[in-house]
Image (tube, grey):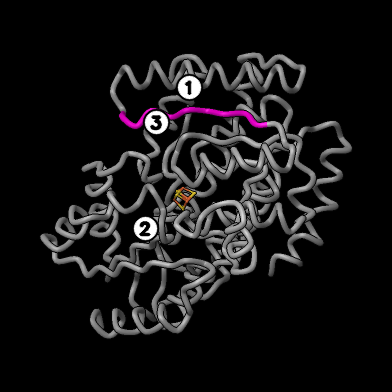
Amino acid sequence: MNVNEIEALLVPYLRKIKASGKKLYGILAHGLIPEELIYAAGGFPLRLILAGDKNPSTKGIEYLTSATCSFARATIGHFELKNELYSELDAIIGGNYCNGELCAIELISEYFNIPKLSIVFPSTKNEFALKFMVAELDHFKQDLERFGGIQISDEQLQNAIERYDTERDLIQEIVKIQSERGPFLSGSESLDLMYRHFLYGVDSSIEHLKQVIKELPNKQSLSKGKKILFAGNGVAFGDNIIQLIERQGLIVTKNLTWTGLDYYNSLVGRNGTPLTALARYYINAENSGRMVLSTDYFKNLTRIYEENDLDGVIFYIIKHCSIIPSLISMNLKAHLKSKEIPYLELERDYSLTSEAQLLTRIQAFKEMIE
Ligand code: SF4
């Protein structure tokens, strides 16, 4: 499905949601904004995932320099190109996650006249950071209450957490079936499951995941092809990087990015007050890459690689991403080298990098691991 088809299908869906009285919140932060709070506030969180194509990314240069990541540029570009999907937003929510996000949210709010709600994430995981995160979530909750003219009770928040945990449970079930009996789903098919969540929301995603689980045993196992762990930047809608990898005969069986099923490998549950439980969950979202140079990230990646008997790691970088350069620097490379894990780093600017450049590198990597 391309961006125009998505627009044609989704706009009526979102208008219906708005007609039912729900507010539509656009989210840029990659897997870190607690959607549970928006759901509990009676809102609909729409991930601004349309970004992986050339035209909006080039258009975004009118707002952000070409030395800003093409994800942030393309997100603004979609507003400038008057993508109908984004014209429905009541507010936009952003964090301090990275330069791309900070700048994009600021400019979208200013130039497209959309109210902005902010949230700040600590970049460590100690007890003080947890307290800070709880306070930040409380601010965010109050902002949502003010903006929506509502109150969010603990019970509503706990129900929302349970709803999202139900979805995470289903995702984990698919991951388990894939590891133990599969893989049945390719990396691109798994990615489509996440797009369903980002665009259609948690309720629609839960129904869809249940159907997928029912149908999985009837699918043919993808037995051929070297198995790849994909990590680094998430894959925006319109970016065909996973298809390019799989077209070369490799299978992306693990995707640790915020666009992968493996990102949702734990539950919020009941752990103190609902806000504390949420804070604990998001502060430990290790694969988000927010904990720059975290040794836990490397250990986690290696463990998943070894446990799943994989054949190589592909680390994906959106050019000029302010989070990734320090993360991957020599530390990750040295770590994987010491473990003799084959590693390929792929970098892309949606508006500049050609498919041919990427294909040549993927092909050479495939030959190396065969
Ligand atoms: S690609 Fe990197 S810098 Fe750009 S919005 Fe995403 S995390 Fe931020």
Residue at far right of view: 19
* Placement of the N terminus among the 4 image quadrants: bottom right
In terms of depth relative to the viewer, which is nearer, 260 or 146?
A: 146
Location of residue 254 in the rendering, given as x and y in whole percent from the top left corner: 39, 60
| Residue behind mark 2 | 231
- Residue 63 location, x and y as percent? 60, 52
Q: Which residue is mark 3?
A: 283
Q: Residue at x 14, y 66 (%)?
A: 340
Q: Nearer the viewer, residue 56 or 42?
A: 56
Contact flag, marks 2 and 1 (Cβ < 8 Å): no
Disc number placed over residue 105 in the picture, else none: none
Image quarter in which the C terminus is found: bottom left
Q: Residue 65 in the image: state x and y as whole percent.
A: 51, 55
Regarding residue 169, the answer to whether it shows in the image is yes
Instruction: Give the quarter of the image for residue 358.
Output: bottom left
Instruction: Please report whichever mark, 2 or 1, sits nearer to the chain's N-terminal start.
Output: 2
Distance, label 3 to label 2, CA atoms, is 19 Å
Secondary-structure class at tag 3: helix
Tell which circle, 3 or 2, labels the residue nearer the N-terminal end: 2
Pointers 3 and 2 in contact (C-beta within 8 Å): no
Respond yes or no on whether mark 2 lies under 8 Å from ligand 1: no
Using the image as rendered, state which of residue 71 and residue 151 is in the foreground: 71
Q: Earlier in the sequence, mark 1 or mark 3?
A: 1
Instruction: Give the number of the disc on residue 270.
Output: 1
Amino acid, disc 1: Arg
- Residue 113 located left or right of residue 294: right
Mark 1 residue crowding within 10 angstroms, few (<14) / some (14–19) / many (20+) = some
